[in-house]
Amino acid sequence: GQRLPSNEDTVLVDSQGAAAATPRSALSPLTTSLLEQLEARIKELKAWLRDTELLIFNSCLRQEKDASEQL
């Protein structure tokens, strides 16, 4: 286990499972770049999921069928 970082810090877990907060500035440029790309992709996926859920919800409202049947 690792968790996604907040804006400035990340939590690294060693082989014994001990967590230590590390400032993002201590990470290598490649790691920082990969984290930024990952965060951007997660943001895009969240937006897509929100839009998809709204589309499904609205299409269910317009139909007279049961929502579970519609899905």
Image (cartoon, helix red, strand yellow):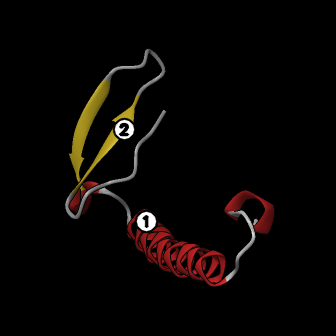
Question: Could you tell me residue 47's position as x and y percent?
Answer: 48, 79
Please give the name of the residue rendered at 46% of the width and 69% of the height, measured from the top-left corner.
30
Q: Amino acid at mark 2?
A: Leu
Q: Nearer the viewer, residue 45 or 40?
A: 45
Helix, strand or loop for disc 2: strand
Please give the name of the residue rendered at 57% of the width and 74% of the height, measured from the top-left corner.
57
Q: Which mark is residue 11?
A: none
- Between the residue at mark 1 and the residue at mark 2, the CA separation in whole angstroms equals 13 Å
Give the crowd class for mark 1: few <14, some 14-19, many >=20 residues within 10 Å. Answer: some
Q: Where, by quadrant of the figure, is residue 39 drawn?
A: bottom left
Q: Mark 2 = which residue?
A: 12
Q: Is residue 9 left or right of residue 11?
A: left
Please give the name of the residue rendered at 59% of the width and 78% of the height, measured from the top-left corner.
61
The C terminus sits in image quarter: bottom right
Give the crowd class for mark 2: few <14, some 14-19, many >=20 residues within 10 Å. Answer: some
Q: Amino acid at mark 1?
A: Leu
Q: Is residue 56 left or right of residue 32?
A: right
Please tell me whether residue 29 is drawn above or below residue 58 in the rendered image.
above
Q: Which mark is residue 35?
A: 1
Instruction: Residue lying at the far right in this picture: please name it.
Output: 69
Q: Is residue 30 left or right of residue 69?
A: left
Sooner in the amino-acid sequence: mark 1 or mark 2: 2
